[in-house]
Protein backbone atom coordinates (compact mmCIF):
# COMPACT_ATOMS: atom_id res chain seq x y z
CA UNK A 1 0.00 0.00 0.00
CA UNK A 2 2.63 2.53 1.05
CA UNK A 3 4.49 2.05 -2.24
CA UNK A 4 1.82 4.18 -3.89
CA UNK A 5 2.74 7.04 -1.56
CA UNK A 6 6.41 6.61 -2.43
CA UNK A 7 5.55 6.70 -6.13
CA UNK A 8 3.64 9.95 -5.66
CA UNK A 9 6.46 11.80 -3.92
CA UNK A 10 9.54 10.25 -5.54
CA UNK A 11 9.67 12.47 -8.64
CA UNK A 12 8.32 15.67 -7.08
CA UNK A 13 10.20 18.70 -5.82
CA UNK A 14 9.18 18.06 -2.21
CA UNK A 15 8.76 20.37 0.77
CA UNK A 16 7.77 19.51 4.33
CA UNK A 17 5.96 22.51 5.80
CA UNK A 18 6.25 22.51 9.58
CA UNK A 19 8.70 20.33 11.50
CA UNK A 20 6.91 19.34 14.69
CA UNK A 21 5.87 15.80 15.59
CA UNK A 22 4.14 15.09 12.29
CA UNK A 23 6.75 16.88 10.17
CA UNK A 24 9.53 14.78 11.71
CA UNK A 25 7.42 11.66 11.11
CA UNK A 26 7.04 12.61 7.44
CA UNK A 27 10.78 13.21 7.09
CA UNK A 28 11.57 9.80 8.62
CA UNK A 29 9.06 8.07 6.34
CA UNK A 30 10.64 9.63 3.25
CA UNK A 31 14.14 8.77 4.41
CA UNK A 32 13.24 5.13 5.10
CA UNK A 33 12.38 4.67 1.44
CA UNK A 34 14.12 7.51 -0.43
CA UNK A 35 17.41 8.08 1.41
CA UNK A 36 18.83 10.37 -1.29
CA UNK A 37 15.67 12.31 -2.05
CA UNK A 38 16.08 16.08 -1.86
CA UNK A 39 13.74 17.54 0.78
CA UNK A 40 13.18 21.17 1.69
CA UNK A 41 12.09 21.66 5.29
CA UNK A 42 10.17 24.89 5.87
CA UNK A 43 9.56 26.16 9.40
CA UNK A 44 9.36 29.43 11.32
CA UNK A 45 11.75 28.21 14.03
CA UNK A 46 15.28 29.54 13.43
CA UNK A 47 16.65 27.09 16.02
CA UNK A 48 15.22 24.04 14.29
CA UNK A 49 18.63 22.64 13.34
CA UNK A 50 19.92 22.86 16.93
CA UNK A 51 16.87 20.92 18.14
CA UNK A 52 17.12 18.29 15.38
CA UNK A 53 20.81 17.55 15.08
CA UNK A 54 20.22 14.55 12.81
CA UNK A 55 19.45 17.00 10.00
CA UNK A 56 23.07 18.20 10.02
CA UNK A 57 24.13 14.77 8.76
CA UNK A 58 21.66 14.81 5.86
CA UNK A 59 23.29 16.31 2.78
CA UNK A 60 20.05 16.12 0.81
CA UNK A 61 18.11 18.53 3.06
CA UNK A 62 17.59 22.25 2.46
CA UNK A 63 16.18 24.50 5.17
CA UNK A 64 13.95 27.55 4.85
CA UNK A 65 13.56 29.10 8.31
CA UNK A 66 12.45 32.32 9.97
CA UNK A 67 9.57 34.78 9.80
CA UNK A 68 9.42 34.72 5.99
CA UNK A 69 9.20 30.93 5.80
CA UNK A 70 5.88 31.02 3.91
CA UNK A 71 7.32 33.03 1.01
CA UNK A 72 7.87 31.27 -2.31
CA UNK A 73 5.83 28.14 -1.59
CA UNK A 74 4.80 28.09 -5.23
CA UNK A 75 8.26 26.89 -6.27
CA UNK A 76 7.61 23.38 -4.89
CA UNK A 77 5.64 20.69 -6.70
CA UNK A 78 4.35 18.96 -3.57
CA UNK A 79 4.02 20.43 -0.08
CA UNK A 80 3.33 18.04 2.81
CA UNK A 81 1.82 20.39 5.39
CA UNK A 82 1.71 19.69 9.11
CA UNK A 83 -1.53 20.54 10.95
CA UNK A 84 -0.22 23.31 13.20
CA UNK A 85 0.95 25.62 10.40
CA UNK A 86 -1.55 28.37 9.65
CA UNK A 87 -1.77 29.75 6.10
CA UNK A 88 -4.21 32.52 7.01
CA UNK A 89 -1.71 35.28 6.27
CA UNK A 90 -0.98 34.32 2.67
CA UNK A 91 -2.91 33.82 -0.55
CA UNK A 92 -2.92 30.08 -1.25
CA UNK A 93 -5.05 30.14 -4.40
CA UNK A 94 -2.07 29.25 -6.60
CA UNK A 95 -0.68 26.53 -4.31
CA UNK A 96 -3.70 24.85 -2.73
CA UNK A 97 -3.62 22.04 -5.30
CA UNK A 98 -0.02 21.34 -4.27
CA UNK A 99 -0.87 21.00 -0.58
CA UNK A 100 -1.19 17.57 0.95
CA UNK A 101 -0.67 16.01 4.38
CA UNK A 102 0.02 12.70 6.04
CA UNK A 103 -3.72 12.29 6.49
CA UNK A 104 -4.44 12.85 2.82
CA UNK A 105 -1.60 10.60 1.67
CA UNK A 106 -2.87 7.69 3.75
CA UNK A 107 -6.49 8.24 2.69
CA UNK A 108 -5.56 8.29 -0.99
CA UNK A 109 -4.41 4.69 -0.75
CA UNK A 110 -6.25 3.37 2.29
CA UNK A 111 -9.53 5.24 2.78
CA UNK A 112 -11.70 2.08 2.74
CA UNK A 113 -9.91 0.84 5.84
CA UNK A 114 -10.15 4.10 7.80
CA UNK A 115 -12.56 5.02 10.57
CA UNK A 116 -12.17 8.76 11.04
CA UNK A 117 -13.43 10.53 14.15
CA UNK A 118 -13.68 14.27 14.70
CA UNK A 119 -15.77 16.76 16.68
CA UNK A 120 -15.22 19.64 19.05
CA UNK A 121 -15.34 17.37 22.10
CA UNK A 122 -15.55 13.63 22.68
CA UNK A 123 -13.39 12.55 19.76
CA UNK A 124 -10.54 11.19 21.92
CA UNK A 125 -12.85 9.12 24.12
CA UNK A 126 -14.80 7.87 21.10
CA UNK A 127 -11.65 7.02 19.14
CA UNK A 128 -10.14 5.12 22.07
CA UNK A 129 -13.35 3.21 22.63
CA UNK A 130 -13.73 2.26 18.97
CA UNK A 131 -10.14 1.01 18.94
CA UNK A 132 -10.66 -1.06 22.11
CA UNK A 133 -13.93 -2.52 20.83
CA UNK A 134 -12.32 -3.61 17.56
CA UNK A 135 -9.16 -4.83 19.31
CA UNK A 136 -11.30 -7.17 21.44
CA UNK A 137 -12.48 -8.95 18.30
CA UNK A 138 -9.79 -8.32 15.68
CA UNK A 139 -6.01 -8.10 15.93
CA UNK A 140 -5.13 -5.96 12.96
CA UNK A 141 -6.15 -2.48 14.14
CA UNK A 142 -4.24 0.72 14.94
CA UNK A 143 -5.14 3.87 16.90
CA UNK A 144 -3.62 6.85 15.10
CA UNK A 145 -3.74 10.56 14.47
CA UNK A 146 -4.42 13.19 17.08
CA UNK A 147 -4.48 10.63 19.90
CA UNK A 148 -1.97 8.04 18.66
CA UNK A 149 1.01 7.82 16.34
CA UNK A 150 1.18 9.91 13.15
CA UNK A 151 -0.39 7.81 10.40
CA UNK A 152 2.86 7.21 8.46
CA UNK A 153 4.89 6.01 11.45
CA UNK A 154 3.84 2.37 11.08
CA UNK A 155 2.57 2.43 7.50
CA UNK A 156 4.80 -0.46 6.46
CA UNK A 157 2.81 -2.74 8.79
CA UNK A 158 -0.59 -2.03 7.22
CA UNK A 159 -2.22 -4.49 4.82
CA UNK A 160 -5.59 -4.99 3.14
CA UNK A 161 -7.12 -6.33 6.37
CA UNK A 162 -5.86 -3.53 8.62
CA UNK A 163 -8.32 -1.12 10.20
CA UNK A 164 -7.10 2.36 11.09
CA UNK A 165 -8.98 4.26 13.79
CA UNK A 166 -7.89 7.86 13.35
CA UNK A 167 -8.76 10.85 15.50
CA UNK A 168 -8.68 13.83 13.14
CA UNK A 169 -8.50 17.48 14.22
CA UNK A 170 -9.95 20.45 12.35
CA UNK A 171 -6.38 21.45 11.44
CA UNK A 172 -5.85 18.05 9.80
CA UNK A 173 -9.18 18.29 7.96
CA UNK A 174 -8.81 21.87 6.76
CA UNK A 175 -7.52 21.15 3.25
CA UNK A 176 -8.48 17.48 3.02
CA UNK A 177 -9.70 16.37 -0.42
CA UNK A 178 -10.64 12.77 0.42
CA UNK A 179 -12.71 11.28 3.26
CA UNK A 180 -12.60 8.08 5.34
CA UNK A 181 -14.97 5.19 4.59
CA UNK A 182 -16.55 5.51 8.04
CA UNK A 183 -16.60 9.11 9.27
CA UNK A 184 -17.97 10.34 12.57
CA UNK A 185 -18.58 13.81 14.01
CA UNK A 186 -19.35 13.77 17.73
CA UNK A 187 -20.57 17.39 17.97
CA UNK A 188 -19.79 20.94 16.88
CA UNK A 189 -19.27 23.87 19.22
CA UNK A 190 -17.26 27.08 19.19
CA UNK A 191 -13.52 26.45 19.30
CA UNK A 192 -10.16 27.09 17.59
CA UNK A 193 -11.15 30.56 16.41
CA UNK A 194 -7.52 31.62 16.84
CA UNK A 195 -6.69 29.36 13.88
CA UNK A 196 -9.93 29.20 11.89
CA UNK A 197 -10.79 32.91 12.40
CA UNK A 198 -14.52 32.31 11.93
CA UNK A 199 -16.92 29.80 13.42
CA UNK A 200 -18.24 28.77 10.00
CA UNK A 201 -14.76 28.09 8.67
CA UNK A 202 -13.94 25.96 11.72
CA UNK A 203 -17.16 23.97 11.31
CA UNK A 204 -16.65 23.41 7.59
CA UNK A 205 -13.14 22.16 8.26
CA UNK A 206 -14.74 19.49 10.46
CA UNK A 207 -17.40 18.75 7.84
CA UNK A 208 -14.67 17.97 5.30
CA UNK A 209 -14.69 14.50 6.88
CA UNK A 210 -18.05 13.92 5.08
CA UNK A 211 -17.56 16.11 2.03
CA UNK A 212 -15.70 13.67 -0.20
CA UNK A 213 -17.51 10.47 0.74
CA UNK A 214 -19.49 8.44 -1.82
CA UNK A 215 -22.69 6.43 -1.57
CA UNK A 216 -20.91 3.38 -0.14
CA UNK A 217 -19.44 5.33 2.78
CA UNK A 218 -20.93 6.05 6.22
CA UNK A 219 -21.45 9.44 7.88
CA UNK A 220 -22.30 9.14 11.59
CA UNK A 221 -23.29 12.36 13.33
CA UNK A 222 -24.85 13.75 16.49
CA UNK A 223 -28.37 14.95 15.71
CA UNK A 224 -28.59 16.55 19.17
CA UNK A 225 -25.79 18.98 18.28
CA UNK A 226 -27.61 22.09 16.99
CA UNK A 227 -24.88 23.18 14.59
CA UNK A 228 -24.47 19.68 13.19
CA UNK A 229 -28.19 19.17 12.74
CA UNK A 230 -28.47 22.37 10.73
CA UNK A 231 -25.50 21.56 8.50
CA UNK A 232 -26.75 18.05 7.83
CA UNK A 233 -30.13 19.45 6.78
CA UNK A 234 -28.64 21.84 4.21
CA UNK A 235 -25.64 19.88 2.93
CA UNK A 236 -26.21 17.17 0.32
CA UNK A 237 -23.61 14.59 1.30
CA UNK A 238 -23.61 11.41 -0.79
CA UNK A 239 -22.80 8.99 2.01
CA UNK A 240 -25.11 6.77 4.02
CA UNK A 241 -26.06 9.10 6.85
CA UNK A 242 -26.58 7.76 10.38
CA UNK A 243 -28.04 10.28 12.79
CA UNK A 244 -27.68 9.56 16.51
CA UNK A 245 -30.00 11.15 19.08
CA UNK A 246 -31.06 10.89 22.70
CA UNK A 247 -34.00 13.22 22.04
CA UNK A 248 -35.78 12.25 18.83
CA UNK A 249 -36.45 9.21 16.68
CA UNK A 250 -33.89 8.76 13.92
CA UNK A 251 -31.59 6.02 12.64
CA UNK A 252 -30.10 5.48 16.10
CA UNK A 253 -32.20 6.75 19.00
CA UNK A 254 -33.21 6.22 22.61
CA UNK A 255 -36.64 4.89 23.54
CA UNK A 256 -37.21 4.79 27.28
CA UNK A 257 -33.97 3.26 28.57
CA UNK A 258 -33.04 1.41 25.39
CA UNK A 259 -30.96 2.61 22.47
CA UNK A 260 -32.14 1.24 19.12
CA UNK A 261 -30.40 0.99 15.75
CA UNK A 262 -33.02 0.67 12.99
CA UNK A 263 -35.45 -0.23 15.80
CA UNK A 264 -33.23 -3.13 16.93
CA UNK A 265 -31.60 -3.27 20.37
CA UNK A 266 -28.16 -1.67 20.59
CA UNK A 267 -27.63 -0.64 24.23
CA UNK A 268 -29.38 -0.30 27.59
CA UNK A 269 -28.53 3.00 29.28
CA UNK A 270 -29.05 1.32 32.66
CA UNK A 271 -26.07 -0.96 32.01
CA UNK A 272 -23.38 -0.55 34.63
CA UNK A 273 -20.87 1.70 32.86
CA UNK A 274 -17.83 3.53 34.19
CA UNK A 275 -18.16 6.55 31.87
CA UNK A 276 -20.42 9.12 33.50
CA UNK A 277 -22.83 11.57 31.88
CA UNK A 278 -25.11 11.80 28.85
CA UNK A 279 -22.24 13.05 26.69
CA UNK A 280 -20.49 9.73 27.34
CA UNK A 281 -23.70 7.84 26.65
CA UNK A 282 -23.63 9.46 23.21
CA UNK A 283 -19.97 8.50 22.80
CA UNK A 284 -20.87 4.90 23.63
CA UNK A 285 -23.70 4.93 21.09
CA UNK A 286 -21.33 6.24 18.40
CA UNK A 287 -18.96 3.40 19.18
CA UNK A 288 -21.65 0.73 19.08
CA UNK A 289 -22.95 2.16 15.80
CA UNK A 290 -19.49 1.64 14.29
CA UNK A 291 -19.47 -1.86 15.81
CA UNK A 292 -22.80 -2.52 14.07
CA UNK A 293 -21.47 -1.32 10.70
CA UNK A 294 -18.44 -3.59 11.09
CA UNK A 295 -20.67 -6.56 12.01
CA UNK A 296 -18.90 -7.07 15.33
CA UNK A 297 -20.46 -8.99 18.21
CA UNK A 298 -22.64 -6.44 20.00
CA UNK A 299 -22.47 -8.24 23.35
CA UNK A 300 -18.67 -8.19 23.36
CA UNK A 301 -18.68 -4.57 22.23
CA UNK A 302 -21.01 -3.59 25.08
CA UNK A 303 -18.73 -5.33 27.59
CA UNK A 304 -15.77 -3.27 26.37
CA UNK A 305 -17.58 0.08 26.54
CA UNK A 306 -19.01 -0.66 30.00
CA UNK A 307 -15.55 -1.55 31.36
CA UNK A 308 -13.82 1.51 29.84
CA UNK A 309 -12.67 3.85 32.63
CA UNK A 310 -12.07 6.90 30.43
CA UNK A 311 -9.07 8.91 29.34
CA UNK A 312 -6.37 10.28 31.56
CA UNK A 313 -7.08 13.92 32.48
CA UNK A 314 -10.74 13.71 31.37
CA UNK A 315 -12.94 13.77 34.50
CA UNK A 316 -10.17 11.82 36.24
CA UNK A 317 -10.54 11.22 39.97
CA UNK A 318 -7.13 11.79 41.55
CA UNK A 319 -8.09 11.01 45.13
CA UNK A 320 -9.76 12.16 48.33
CA UNK A 321 -7.76 14.28 50.79
CA UNK A 322 -9.17 15.78 53.99
CA UNK A 323 -12.61 14.53 52.91
CA UNK A 324 -12.43 16.54 49.68
CA UNK A 325 -12.62 14.66 46.37
CA UNK A 326 -10.31 16.04 43.67
CA UNK A 327 -10.90 15.72 39.93
CA UNK A 328 -8.82 16.88 36.98
CA UNK A 329 -10.37 17.61 33.59
CA UNK A 330 -7.91 19.63 31.51
CA UNK A 331 -9.24 17.98 28.35
CA UNK A 332 -12.28 20.25 28.86
CA UNK A 333 -11.08 23.09 26.65
CA UNK A 334 -14.46 24.64 25.85
CA UNK A 335 -17.33 25.79 28.12
CA UNK A 336 -19.67 23.00 27.05
CA UNK A 337 -17.17 20.34 28.13
CA UNK A 338 -16.76 21.93 31.55
CA UNK A 339 -20.53 22.07 32.03
CA UNK A 340 -20.77 18.38 31.04
CA UNK A 341 -18.12 17.51 33.64
CA UNK A 342 -19.85 19.42 36.42
CA UNK A 343 -23.13 17.68 35.61
CA UNK A 344 -21.59 14.21 35.28
CA UNK A 345 -19.40 14.34 38.40
CA UNK A 346 -21.92 16.09 40.65
CA UNK A 347 -21.47 17.72 44.08
CA UNK A 348 -18.87 20.18 42.75
CA UNK A 349 -18.25 22.80 45.45
CA UNK A 350 -15.10 24.38 44.02
CA UNK A 351 -14.41 24.89 40.33
CA UNK A 352 -10.97 25.89 39.01
CA UNK A 353 -11.34 27.53 35.62
CA UNK A 354 -9.33 29.49 33.06
CA UNK A 355 -6.64 29.24 30.40
CA UNK A 356 -5.65 30.65 27.03
CA UNK A 357 -8.06 33.11 25.42
CA UNK A 358 -8.96 31.94 21.90
CA UNK A 359 -11.83 34.34 21.35
CA UNK A 360 -14.60 31.95 22.44
CA UNK A 361 -17.90 33.26 23.79
CA UNK A 362 -18.19 32.42 27.52
CA UNK A 363 -21.66 33.80 28.16
CA UNK A 364 -23.25 30.33 28.42
CA UNK A 365 -20.93 29.10 31.17
CA UNK A 366 -21.19 32.40 33.05
CA UNK A 367 -24.98 32.02 33.07
CA UNK A 368 -24.66 28.36 34.06
CA UNK A 369 -22.27 29.07 36.96
CA UNK A 370 -24.41 31.92 38.28
CA UNK A 371 -27.35 29.51 38.52
CA UNK A 372 -25.34 26.54 39.81
CA UNK A 373 -24.85 25.22 43.33
CA UNK A 374 -21.09 25.68 43.09
CA UNK A 375 -19.92 27.88 45.97
CA UNK A 376 -16.32 28.68 44.99
CA UNK A 377 -14.87 29.70 41.63
CA UNK A 378 -11.08 29.89 41.44
CA UNK A 379 -10.07 31.84 38.34
CA UNK A 380 -6.73 31.44 36.56
CA UNK A 381 -5.51 33.66 33.70
CA UNK A 382 -6.57 34.59 31.13
CA UNK A 383 -10.12 33.47 30.52
CA UNK A 384 -10.74 32.73 34.18
CA UNK A 385 -10.32 36.43 34.95
CA UNK A 386 -12.85 37.37 32.27
CA UNK A 387 -15.35 34.84 33.58
CA UNK A 388 -14.76 35.59 37.26
CA UNK A 389 -15.52 39.28 36.85
CA UNK A 390 -19.04 38.35 35.70
CA UNK A 391 -19.84 35.77 38.38
CA UNK A 392 -22.42 36.80 40.98
CA UNK A 393 -23.36 35.40 44.40
CA UNK A 394 -20.33 33.11 44.52
CA UNK A 395 -16.98 33.31 46.24
CA UNK A 396 -14.56 34.18 43.45
CA UNK A 397 -10.78 34.04 43.78
CA UNK A 398 -8.21 35.24 41.25
CA UNK A 399 -4.96 33.28 41.44
CA UNK A 400 -2.11 32.52 39.03
CA UNK A 401 0.11 29.81 40.50
CA UNK A 402 -1.22 26.28 40.78
CA UNK A 403 0.23 25.83 44.25
CA UNK A 404 -1.78 28.82 45.48
CA UNK A 405 -4.86 27.54 43.66
CA UNK A 406 -4.73 24.15 45.39
CA UNK A 407 -4.09 25.73 48.79
CA UNK A 408 -7.14 27.96 48.34
CA UNK A 409 -9.24 24.99 47.18
CA UNK A 410 -8.20 23.04 50.27
CA UNK A 411 -9.20 25.99 52.45
CA UNK A 412 -12.63 26.76 50.97
CA UNK A 413 -14.07 23.45 49.67
CA UNK A 414 -16.68 21.96 51.95
CA UNK A 415 -16.08 18.54 53.48
CA UNK A 416 -17.37 15.67 51.31
CA UNK A 417 -17.48 18.07 48.38
CA UNK A 418 -15.69 17.98 45.05
CA UNK A 419 -12.91 20.24 43.79
CA UNK A 420 -12.76 20.16 39.99
CA UNK A 421 -10.11 21.61 37.69
CA UNK A 422 -11.92 22.04 34.38
CA UNK A 423 -10.50 25.06 32.52
CA UNK A 424 -13.08 25.55 29.71
CA UNK A 425 -10.06 26.80 27.77
CA UNK A 426 -6.84 25.61 26.22
CA UNK A 427 -3.84 25.15 28.52
CA UNK A 428 -1.40 26.68 26.02
CA UNK A 429 0.26 30.03 26.77
CA UNK A 430 0.83 29.10 30.40
CA UNK A 431 1.57 25.38 29.95
CA UNK A 432 2.99 23.28 27.13
CA UNK A 433 -0.18 21.19 26.98
CA UNK A 434 -3.26 20.07 28.88
CA UNK A 435 -1.14 17.20 30.24
CA UNK A 436 1.39 19.56 31.81
CA UNK A 437 -1.34 21.62 33.45
CA UNK A 438 -3.04 18.49 34.76
CA UNK A 439 0.21 17.11 36.11
CA UNK A 440 1.02 20.37 37.88
CA UNK A 441 -2.37 20.23 39.58
CA UNK A 442 -1.99 16.55 40.48
CA UNK A 443 1.48 17.14 41.91
CA UNK A 444 0.23 20.05 44.01
CA UNK A 445 -2.68 18.01 45.33
CA UNK A 446 -0.70 14.84 46.04
CA UNK A 447 2.78 16.02 46.94
CA UNK A 448 3.29 19.71 47.54
CA UNK A 449 0.56 20.30 50.09
CA UNK A 450 0.83 19.16 53.70
CA UNK A 451 -2.43 17.27 54.16
Image (cartoon, rainbow, N blue to C red):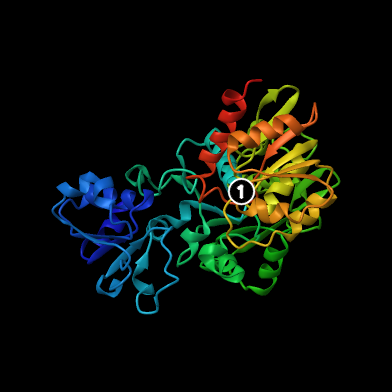
Q: Under tag 1, what secondary structure?
A: helix
Residue nearest the viewer, comparing 259 with 386: 386
Residue 166 locus on image (x, y percent): 49, 49
Q: Which residue is mark 1?
A: 290
* Residue 7 can be seen, yes or no: yes
Q: Name which quarter of the figure residue 376 lies in.
A: top right
Residue occupying the point 24% across, 50% down = 49
Residue occupying the point 20% across, 65% down = 11
Q: Is residue 19 left or right of residue 217?
A: left
Quarter of the rendering occupied by the C terminus? top right
Crowding around mark 1 (Cα neighbors within 10 Å: few <14, some 14 to 19, many 20+) is: many
Q: Is residue 281 left or right of residue 429?
A: right
* Relative height, residue 152 to residue 301 (above, below): below
Residue occupying the point 70% across, 37% down = 420
Residue 230 locus on image (x, y percent): 70, 69
Residue nearest the viewer, comparing 409 with 320: 409
Q: Name which quarter of the figure residue 271 lies in.
A: top right
Amino acid sequence: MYNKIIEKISNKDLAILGFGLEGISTYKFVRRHLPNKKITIIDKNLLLLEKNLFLKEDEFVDLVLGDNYLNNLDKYELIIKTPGVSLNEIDISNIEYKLTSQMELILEVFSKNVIGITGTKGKSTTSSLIYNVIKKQRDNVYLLGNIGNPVLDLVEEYNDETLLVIEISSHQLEYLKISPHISLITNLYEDHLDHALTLERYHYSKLNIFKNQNSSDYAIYNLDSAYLKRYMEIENYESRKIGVSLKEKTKVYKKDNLVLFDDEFLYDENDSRKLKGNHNLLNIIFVLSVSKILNLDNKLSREVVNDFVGLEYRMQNIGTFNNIEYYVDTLATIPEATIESIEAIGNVDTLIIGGMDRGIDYSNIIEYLNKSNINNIICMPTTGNKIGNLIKNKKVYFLEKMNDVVLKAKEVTKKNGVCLLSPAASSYQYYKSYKDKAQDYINCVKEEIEW
